[in-house]
Amino acid sequence: MSAIELHEASKAFGSTPVLERVDLDVPERSITAVLGASGSGKTTLLRLIAGFEALDGGTLTVGGRVVDDGARSVPAQHRGVGYVPQEGALFPHLTVRGNVGFGLSRGERGRVSDLLDLVGLGELARRYPHQLSGGQQQRVALARALAIGPAVVLLDEPFSALDASLRSELRRDVARILSETATTTVLVTHDQGEALAMADQIALLNDGTVIAAGAPRRLYQDPPGLAAAASIGEFNLLAAQVDGATARTALGEISIVGPGASAGPGDDGLGGSCQVMLRPEQLELRLVAGSADTAAEVLEVQYLGHDALARLRVRGDGTPVLLARIPGELSLEPGQSVWIAVTGAGRAWPATAAS
Amino acid sequence: MATLSPPRTAAWMTRRRRPAREIGLLVVAGIIALALLSPLALVALDAHSAGWGEIHRTLFRARSVMLLRHTVVLAAIVAVAAALLGTGTAWLTERAALPARRLWTVLLVLPVAVPDFVVSYAWHSFAPRIPSLLGASIVMTLGTYPLVYLPVAAALRRADPSMEEAAHSLGVGRWATLRRVTLPLVRTAIIGGCVLVVLTVISEFGAFEILGYQTFTTEIFTEFQFDARAAGSLAIPLVLLGLAVLLAEGLLPGRTVAGSAPRRAVRPVRLRRMTVPAMAGLGALVVLAVGVPVGTIVYWMAAAQQTTLPAAATLTSATLTTLSYSAAGAAAAVVLALPVALISLRRSTVPRTVLERSTYLTKALPGVVIALSLVFFATRYAFGLYETSTLLVVAYVILNFPLALVCVKASVAHVPPRLTDVGRSLGRGPVAVFVRVTLPLLAPGLLAGFCLVFLTAVTELTATLVLAPIGVQTLATQFWAFQQNIAYSAAAPYALVMLALAVIPGTLLGLWFDRERSTRA
């Protein structure tokens, strides 16, 4: 069953549309990440679910109950939706204990200690927010949201203000706490790594619409469209001529899958031109020519430690610059010649649909 | 979808578009703004009822030209002097390696708590022959330079020192940096301070009366005792002057200092050989502005014969009256400022902007004009209010509303909407969120607003003289009565109690201001 269902949800501020006919299902006890650039409407989406804003059209269902039908809405305080805003937004005049107990009645305050233990801050109950580090503040904010036993917890870019090392540690902790408490979670982020690492489901938000939703692995390997492919990870795009299950590209013959693969010759009499998407790790670089390899020139190498991204140009060809992920220990110099071999199948779309 | 059975609909559903609460707040704030602006309408009504002939007779004569010249010349002198003093002292306390810096930041603000008419009483009782323009310039400059010091010091503290460092790295020297980087950064603050200075000079009465410097305010007072209608028409140029100053400020291009908070401490400029002269200058300033009045009061009290000191009972009753009027005015001003400040929490809309701007218009209304308009209102439409303490408290509220609003608005910034959002998402209704989140966070600002209005009301003379009920004396009016009869010794204790009453709220205010600056910075 879905914990949250958005159906054709629309929202505009004045004459500026922010969300347009958004459909989204959030399964129970899962983490759904809403991934989008800033200005894509993801915070608005969260505020609509929390009840701080009301829909202009469409319906929103939380826990099987319609809480907003575009004309009437349930106020935030009656939704039972936990909310962790950016940078925590702890009440500065209350201690950690006071913050976590804010939504509890007097009789329930005993649970505060358990909640603080859950987030690993049992000793800091008497501290005030300004005496906590950024990561500790986020933990308190999470405990505060979990205190009311919410049907859903919403996290709005919860780790964006933290430095990288702290971020990955807190990310793991939060994921553990959420799965221990079997909490349905919607996480809003612009960080692809965060979405891929934490989420059971990723919804890609682009210009106010959900362009794709699905499991992280499927979205990365088998994106439904070019925009979806571009929203997650690096990619290469090659013009190609389809011939059955293979396509002729600047990198030679590549086996392909996806909607472009069926656009065989004869459909329109022009021959099936399509676009083929390859992830950088599908380009394998060799220093010695093999049988079916394509010669290319190294333009530059971006060293990332565990691996590196090489930018390449196919020799004697005007094709766009290609990206290849190479092992970190492989040292390449700009101008050097390499040979490209393609592994796995490319993802193909008809040329018109992809442009 | 239509064929499916509709999902269970929650019982809590409320119809909405614009929440009724928000409209209610807007209406309340609108009524408050209208009430605050009513003196403007009343001045116009007053002038209208006096008739064109009367206005013509009072305003279009050589004497008016003299009064106007006096007002403008003095305002210009004081504005320039206060800008120099205020900016210079602010630079010294914020950018220079000044010994005992924190002590200076407190001492330099103290003159605000000393009413100008007490300062001029001090100077006049020692040097009765001082030329009136010189005396008025000195007294007003000493009393108003903190109005420039405070905003400029705040702007300097907020300004990122890395901009000055960038200038140095580009090979620009210290003085050129001051001129080309630092001063432009605080220009808006200097102009804002000068506007307050000019408005203060325009509306001052007591100090000028003592020094024999004639302006529109002293003229209004003289006329008021004989011919209330003539006084009403004299208010017109005063109001126009005030509005012109506000308008000029609004037309000047405002630039706010880039908000990036400096995380690093400023490396202060070492004064070296200039340290001693700088300290001496600051010391002289504080002595002239605070030491001389306090010393004079003490001198006259010591010189007094036992008989000329007022009976303790009179002093006590005047103190209690002052306390109750000022506290009532301060509380009312803060309570009324709250809805207007809360409006600024909402998303920016046209009604919000109009409201905020209009409440600031009262800044342009001198106390004497507000008092006269209330007298006109009471005698015409509500005689039951005439000569009651209510009318005086109303005057305090109208006069000091902008002060209360500044403080309350500053603390509203401590309650970002996301905090109240979180409160609601935790299952608390709007009332509970207001009581448990909004109010505790606003409290310091409300207290600061109360202190500021209270302090100003305790030392208010002009409106109090006009509106105090017959037979009731406040500290200021009793001081004034004795002072006018050259009973300097009898007047002194009243001035002393006034200063004492102003000290506690003044200190609280200083603490709040310091906190506000450091949390913002």
Image (tube, rainbow, N blue to C red):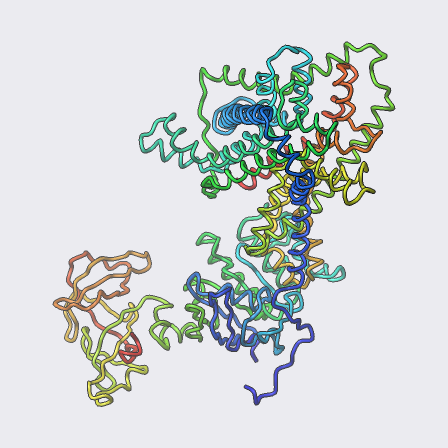
Q: Does residue B145 appear in this view?
A: no
Residue B510, how many percent across, how many down? 63, 32
Specify the farthest residue to the front.
B53
A333 left or right of A62 in image: left
Picture quadrant of residue B69: top right
Residue B241, how many percent across, how many down? 57, 34
Looking at the image, residue B161 lies above or below residue B423: above
Depth check: give the residue in front, A49 or A101: A49
A335 left or right of A156 in image: left
Residue A350, how many percent across, how many down? 28, 80
Picture quadrant of residue A306: bottom left
Picture quadrant of residue A49: bottom right
Give the quadrant of the N terminus of chain B.
bottom right
Depth check: give the residue in front, A19 or B68: B68
Looking at the image, residue B276 lies above or below residue A197: above
Q: Does residue B335 appear in this view?
A: yes
Residue A348, how many percent across, how many down? 29, 79
Q: Residue at x 52, y 74 (%)?
A: A9
